[in-house]
Image: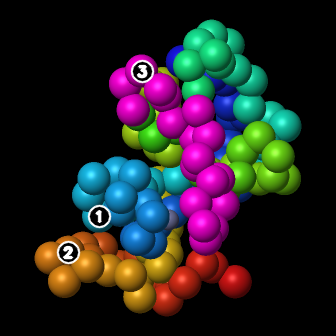
Amino acid sequence: MRFELPDEFQAVVFCHCATCKKLSGGVGTANGRVRTETIRLLAGDDLVRTYQPDEGTAKTFCSVCGSNLFGGGWPDSEFTSVRLSAIETPFDQRPDAHLYVRSVAPWETLPDDGLERFEVGRT
Ligand SMILES: [Zn+2]
């Protein structure tokens, strides 16, 4: 699956919520926020599946390799959280916050990186 994004993210964050842990198989996800309409799928869009959890927004992944692609309710939402791990071209923006730190797991250690921390989402 290949896609094209705008030049800049509106925000770049780490999410430590319970759903992101399950999706990532680790401590959570790293996301760049863009307007949904600015994402252009270039190839492999028939491989993409979207999962709607009981709580929270829809998550989109590749049905072949399982890679986590989008969160935040793509394709119907106004904004989409693009998983940074799905982006193959270099970019300069870096995460500036940890979200959902209330869901940090007992086996997880938040890095001492000076980034702002939020109990839930950023308000
Ligand atoms: Zn999350």
Q: Residue at x 30, y 73 (%)?
A: 113
Closest to the observer, 93 or 97: 97
Which residue is drawn at the image coordinates 29% and 64% (left, top)?
Answer: 27
Mark 3 or mark 2, earlier in chain: 3
Task: Tell me what residue is drawn at x 72 percent, y 45 percent.
Answer: 74
**Which residue bears the numbered disc 2?**
108
Whether residue 57 is visible to the viewer of this picture, yes or no, is yes
Q: Which image quarter is the N terminus in? A: top right
**Marks 2 and 1, the one that precedes in the sequence:** 1
Q: Which residues are magenta?
A: 49-66
Apparent side of residue 98 relative to residue 71 in the rendered image (left or right): left
Q: Inspect the magenta stretch and tell me whether residue 112 lies in it.
A: no
Identify the amino acid type marked 1.
Val
* Residue under label 1: 27
- In the picture, the disc for residue 64 is 3
For label 1, count other residues whose C-alpha is less than 10 Å away and answer few (under 14), some (14-19) or many (20+): many
Label annotation for residue 66 = none
Quarter of the figure with the C terminus: bottom right
For the residues marked 3 and 2, what is the alpha-carbon distance in whole angstroms? Answer: 29 Å
> Which of 79 and 46 lies nearest the eye of the viewer?
46
- Labels 2 & 1 near each other (Cβ < 8 A): yes
**In this rendering, which labeled residue sits more in front, label 3 or label 2?**
3
Q: CA distance from mark 3 to mark 1?
A: 23 Å
- Asked if residue 33 shows in the view, the reply is no
Secondary structure mostly taken by the magenta-highlighted segment of the chain: loop
Q: Secondary structure at mark 1?
A: loop
